[in-house]
Image: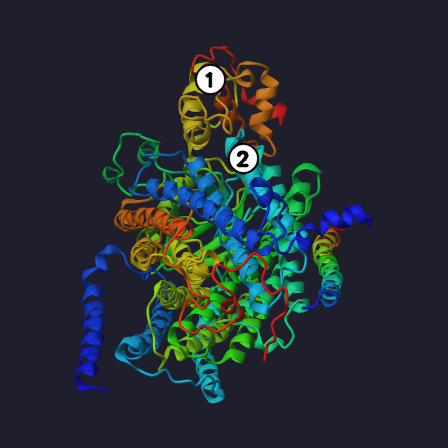
Amino acid sequence: MSHSKWKRLWLGLLGTGLGLGLAAPAMADWALNMPRGATAISNEVYDLHMLILGICCLIAIVVFGVMIVSIFLHRKSRGVEPAQFHHSTKAEIIWTVIPILILVGMAVPAAETLVRMEDTRNADITVKVTGYQWKWRYDYLDDDIGFYSTLDRASNAARRLNSGIQPAGVDNYLLDVDNPLVVPVGAKVRLLITAADVLHAWWMPDFAIKKDAIPGFVNEAWFRVEKAGTYRGQCAELCGRDHGFMPVVVIAKDPADYAEWMADQRSAAGLGDEPGEALAATPVAATSVAAAAPAVDGEREIDDLVAMGEALYQQHCAACHQADGSGMAPAFPALAGSPVVTGSLDEHVGVVLKGRPGTAMAPFGPQLTDLQLAAIVTYQRNAWGNDTGDVVQPGYIAAAR
Amino acid sequence: MSTAEHHVADHAHDDHDHGPAKGIMRWLTTTNHKDIGTMYLVFALIMFLTGGTMALVIRAELFQPGLQLVEPAFFNQMTTMHALIMVFGAVMPATVGLANWMIPMMVGAPDMALPRMNNWSFWILPVAFTLLLSTLLMPGGAPAAGWTMYPPLVQQTGDAFPFMVFSIHLMGASSIMGAINIIVTIMNMRAPGMTLLKMPLFVWTWLITAYLLIAVMPVLAGGVTMLLTDQYFGTTFFRADGGGDPVMFQHIFWFFGHPEVYIMILPAFGIISEIIPTFSRKPLFGYESMVYATASIAFLSFIVWAHHMFTVGMPLAGELFFMFSTMLIAVPTGVKVFNWISTMWRGAMTFETPMLFSIAFVILFTIGGFSGLMLAIAPADFQYHDSYFVVAHFHYVLVPGAVFAIMAGVYYWLPKWTGHMYSEKLGKLHFWISTISVNVLFFPQHFLGLAGMPRRIPDYNTQFADFNMISSIGAFVFGFSQLLFVYIIWRCVKGGEPATAEVWESPAGLEWTVPSPAPYHTFDVAPEVK
Amino acid sequence: MSMPDEAQRRRKARINAVKLALLALAFYAVFIVAQLYRGQ
């Protein structure tokens, strides 16, 4: 082999290596790589990822290197005579055994990390996470509070088709929620993950947690955040139309701040200082919206119900039926002028309570209180030109359940 | 069978010396493996362009953050239909088309063993895809729950639901009939002297693929049948509220779905194993180990399925088993790559278009293999799963993997089919534009996934904007460069420099012993294989 | 390939094809039946 050919080859390899070496730091702020994250486990996963990536790159350099050398040297235009060898048992054994050894070297640390990830024992706090189309619900099982977590208003306005709002102008576009999950720093938090309608997946890249939320089944995951801060993720399992619009946001607070936050939540929900006082007769814990309203279920004025219903409608219904009730036919029917909404009250309440099986219309009976449902139904029957004048009282909903 | 029926049925058979019938009836009634192979290939090309158009809708919407073009519901219909069409309409029919054309010629048989069933298994396909595509016009739109059709979401599909299930049944029936035909052709119709270990590797990989098809297409059919009865007949196979288990569908789907991956890639391995020796002017290195590696991959494909579902909350033991078994697949796959490179080593290579596509296949498929190995590591998979990293991974093995191999095969055998050489200059142009743009399209998606972008979302945070824009530009260049492919084929069919029987410099195989274009009937008298 | 020989090969091929089709049907049924039993 001529000297100049070798020189060309080495220069080529050197150039490639240099290019890769220079590119890596320069592109660091482009978010090229997996985040290290905020927990010991996420750091382990990151190291594992880098280890496998490194091994793959090394193998690639060797294998593709041999191939590229061959492409340069063994070409007909250089007048070479093709060799005729076509078999070598020794070679086959070598390139079967060496990969197996490399794989064992990868499998051992991977298995160790996996065992640690699955150990959900001795948790300090347990939060039940429920996926809905298209929002999350967090229930603090030890403290009797719970709330829904939906896409924040600014993102929600900007994400409409041709909304005219630049996503770049919205802080944390599609990655912010109204009520984030709040956890204390340093505590082992266990999540019990499930779903109410279809599959979802709770993904928090900074904790290296991705777990499917499955209706009828409960999955477990755990994390221990090392430093205070806000962490953002998204739903990772296709769950229908607004799959891209149900972010996961976790705020980790110092234990003292967390205790203060929890006390505020409990007093807003009408609970005392001691955990363990079961919530009232409602099927689920009151949402923060409900907590803001007076807690007595008496007769209501239409204006109160409409005002409260409008806020709830935007939170729970507008994703499909649209803010102006125009819907998106045929999958999501219009509510403005709808025969159901302007017709029989029983049927209307029935659909809202029990949903429509086989469609995306979820049963809201288990999700909301009598008062909240009464407000939503009253709002729907009096908005967008549906001027029926009907007022639905919480007692009516309770009777219809 | 009465005499009259017998006469009609054997008409084509009796008419050996005549050419094919004229007009549309030739194509509707043909039992000729070459005609049927051509129809499969043309159908696959049409579906490739259809599915590609849907991919461009997806990439156009993802060009920048915010929703500019389509509603999220329609976006989900596009991702679902794109996948179903590319998997069942483009890649699988293309490899079946190549099998139809080449396997009888490679084993020295006059035709497929069951020519009339062959006609039927093709003509079911246009019906199946007309049904599937018609759902785009139905109330509620096309299926939008992803090609994986996970319940309970898939139960929210509108009127399209039974059409989707029925069209998948038809595609499955077509695949199973095609697979049966290929197996019995290979097992019963080989020329004297063509022992199993003398068969070209393309025939071997297709034999193993056909067995995979027979084993898993019925499983998919069973799964979608259960979805259908859950929807309309009150069963609760997958409904938690009736005691069923939605995750069980995922197990059934991926028990089909993982072998399905190899159904798409094993014939590609076969094509590459034909092309690299020809243009290296050197016999394939390690023929027998290639056969054993293919069989090992096929076997392993049945015991790795749950690596698609690491996040469903399996017991630790299950996660460990599926992690280890999945990593094991890297061994036989590595053997194949090493054998291809050893075939090239000390050969005398030339770089015509088929060889260029094959070399790109080896490199880019291997990159997809590396990301596959990374995905096998369960703890890391919790980060990669359902992110754009996975999208990048399976597109690397399917586009510059399976699709490039099919294109390599088309360029390789096109002169044999048409009797003309294609334009080498345009072929190379097509290769370079495709190879560069496919990397611009899919490589940045690795970064998007690692940075935290989930798949199947129509809109995203601005931190993902740059790579999405680069990816979309690559998509449009790649998409439109395929029109060049169509033009090259069309021009080659119409005319061009006449091809010799051998076409290339001393390629191996019986198909090169017949004239170019291959006559309508070949090997009426079986060749003697030494 | 002489004609009687080819006819014989095709007959064998048809018999094998039927066997394979039955195998496919069995796979189809087995999965559904297994699920039905699971549900009991």
Nearer mark to the viewer, of 2 and 1: 2
Front residue of C33/A174: it is C33
Q: Residue placed at 38% from the left, 50% from the top?
A: B491
Residue type at mark 2: give it: Thr
Place of residue B128 in the rendered image (x, y in percent of width and height, measured from the top left)? 59, 42
- Residue corresponding to mark 2: B135
Front residue of B127/B31: it is B31
In the rendered structure, find residue B225 and report the number of the disc placed on it: none
Place of residue B58 in the rendered image (x, y in percent of width and height, measured from the top left)? 38, 42
Residue type at mark 1: give it: Ala
Q: Residue furthest right?
A: B2
Q: What separation in Å lies between label 2 and label 1 (alpha carbons)?
A: 28 Å
- Residue corresponding to mark 1: A336
Question: Relative to C10, is B486 above or below?
Answer: above
Q: Is label 1 in a helix, a strand or a loop?
A: loop
Q: Residue furthest bottom?
A: A90
